[in-house]
Image (cartoon, rainbow, N blue to C red):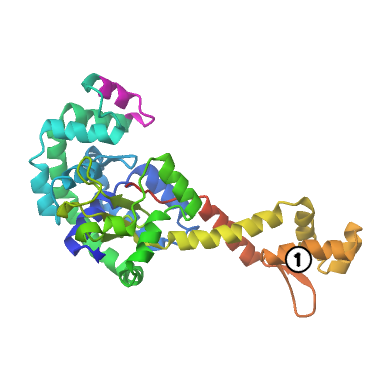
Amino acid sequence: MKFSSKEKRQLLDFIIGLECLNPEYMFSLEEKQNKIDTIEFYTLYKAIYNEISSLILDFNNVFCSPFYPMLQMTYRSLYKKQNIENVYEFLTAIKTLTDEEIKFTLKMLIGTTSCNDAETIEAIKNLQESGQVKYYLLQIYENPSQFIANTLKVFETIYPIYLNYFTKAEDLFSKKLEKVLAMDKAEIYKASINFLGSEKLSALQREYKDIKRISLEEAERCGNEIEVVPLMFGANRINIITKPNEGDTTFNNTHNKPIYCIGLDSIFYAKKMKKAEVISKKVLKALSDDTRLDILRMISFGLNTNKKLSKFFQVSPPAITYQTNILKEAGIIDTREYGSLYVKRDHLEYSLNQIQELLSLKCNSEH
């Protein structure tokens, strides 16, 4: 396993990391910023979005939608032919693409490779997407050469702005980047295959999307060691590029080594979500019972001993103790030195935020 060059990191962080840069996503970031602790990522996205807002139309003509990332798919298509190490090689390669190659790339993106032009156009019109996104995709399919011109324009106008922020991003993410660079390949591989924070859910997701899980041994066969690209603008993304030629699953082509583009936050996501899952299950179990909810309320009102609670609810002390022990195990209440019960409000709020995090599946993984 090796880490990619800075030039390649810059290119792929632009292509993958900026895919979600749209008004809807920025609005969702505003809502989440005070609840989720990936502050570096949100600060970064907001700053660059404000800077390029006057160029957002040019940006959308190329990036289209995070669900239909045309620029990333173009990189994947080019990667089947040659390795691309920097922006110069990428733009040089894009200029060589024919109209048919661009149209086929879009067909791969929407799953219509066996369809003719009319069927593909109809499929685009029927996508469950906004009219704006469908318009962008139709423009690319009907005028592929314009997509090349638009891409070159984006790299001429927006990419230099992005590079300035890339330097700032390295400062913002310095601690996380340092931790990642010290990781061994097994840790990074585990993060990449456990992208939903649960081995069970991640395995089901791979099966659902027909994604092949590639073992470390298979990925590094024939000297094709894994290349890791830590993403900062794509801090919450996971994209694994493993594009062998048709029928070739051995990665014998030297330029077809697997590229693991992994967001710095996503690398720690599985571990964080495992902890959140444990906390959430205990808290949800504790709060799922009407009696325990009533006990919790009455502790807040001052009935702060098992004896008082037993008398109030007219049940035996052991029955109350059983219920309060479940609340203690969940970290929702505790006992002071002199024996009274109290609600751990900070921990309860933290636990509820963990539940919210657990239900916020932020990673995007494509093999």
State which quarter of the image contains the N terminus.
Answer: bottom left
Residue drawn at the location 35% of the way across and 28% of the way down: 127
Residue 155 in sight:
yes
Task: Decide which of 125, 206 is in the foreground and name it.
Answer: 206
* Residue 91 pos. (x, y %): 11, 47
Vertical comparison of 171 with 135: above or below: below
Q: Position of residue 60 (x, y in %)?
A: 26, 40
Vertical comparison of 286 with 2: above or below: above
Q: Quadrant of residue 112 in the image?
A: top left
**In the orientation shown, which residue stands out farthest toward the top?**
118
Question: Residue 117: x percent and y percent?
Answer: 21, 22
Q: Of helix, strand and loop, which mostly describes the magenta segment? A: helix
Residues rendered magenta in the picture: 119-131
Name the residue: 26% across, 53% down: 51
Q: Which residue is mark 1?
A: 325
**Number of numbered tags placed on the structure image:** 1
- Horizontally, is 335 left or right of 78 in the view? right
Kind of element beneath mark 1: helix
Residue flagged by tag 1: what amino acid is it? Asn
The structure residue drawn at horizontal position 25% and vertical position 26%, both measured from the top left corner, is 114
Residue 39 spot, x, y in % from top left: 41, 62
| Residue 122 lies in the magenta-colored region | yes
